[in-house]
Image (cartoon, helix red, strand yellow):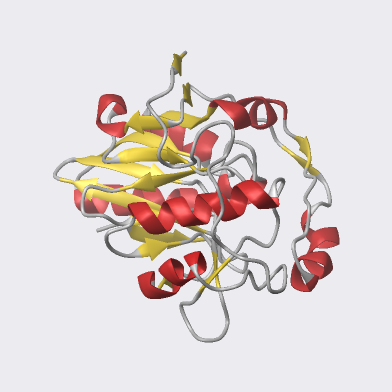
Amino acid sequence: MPVPVTAPRRRCAAYLVVDNNTAMLVDASTRTIAPKVLAKLAEAGAELKLIVLTHYHYDHVGAADTLRDATGARVAIHRLDADALRHGGKLRVNPTRLQARILAPFITRGDKAPVIPDLEFGDDEDLQQHGGFGRSLWTPGHTAGSQCVLLPDGTVLAGDALTEGILPPHSAAGPLFAEDSDASRSSIVAIASAANGKVSVAHRGWLDPRSLKNWQHEPDPARGRDSLSWPPSQRGQPGLTQPGPSSHK
């Protein structure tokens, strides 16, 4: 069962997954979570082996370097987000609705510190091969290299591929920001197809799987009355592609 570790105020959760004496962290939130993660590892008597970043945005990678230095865990990201992670700099976002347009000036201030990944994932990775659990799913849209983690029990850790709506509680909403809105909607359908349990997101909490599946039939709330039954991406169907090459560094 993944345990959320939340940074103060920003409420961006990282998820710690522990099995016996081995641990995997999905997302690294901000630097302030590092002591919390280390305390939970000590409490569980577990060794952190792998840090999977769902994408390169600063509120998902902040503690990666500190935790890697403290534990020796390897940091992994999808290959399409690797350069942005490596270079750092100013965050640029594309708002999908009014709430996002209001937030955008606040989250794009300042420069993001670079993080050098140890692993660059392909579209579908067996995480056991890298010391983790389950598999990664390429779910582009929020960023080009956004990825989710599908755990063995069917839980999906979705990062920012989805957000939790306000009403009704735990309803599935699209991301506040998307580099590619069409790819994002296709990825949400892929997540709904892959999930066989709880879907947890980085901001706010978990989603009702029933509301996620409704995205295949109901209009996109960010785009009016558009249909939500989309064809696969020309690059392959997000979340359901064949394993891609990894770059191990």
Residue at 51% in and 86% down: 168
- In x, y percent, where is residue 47? 26, 37
Q: 249 or 211, which is in the foreground?
A: 211
Q: Relative to 7, does residue 218 appear above or below in the rendering?
A: below
Q: Residue at x 51, y 59 (%)?
A: 202
Residue 217 against residue 190 in the figure, above or below: below
Q: Residue at x 31, y 26 (%)?
A: 130
- Pinpoint residue 239: horizontal percent, then vertical percent: 44, 42
* Quarter that holds the N terminus: bottom left
Q: Is residue 120 visible?
A: yes
Residue 31 on image: x %, y %? 57, 48
How many dots with numbers?
0
Q: Is residue 39 in view from this perspective? A: no
- Residue positioned most to the left: 20
Say above or below: 204 vs 112. below
From the viewer's perspective, is 77 left or right of 224?
A: left
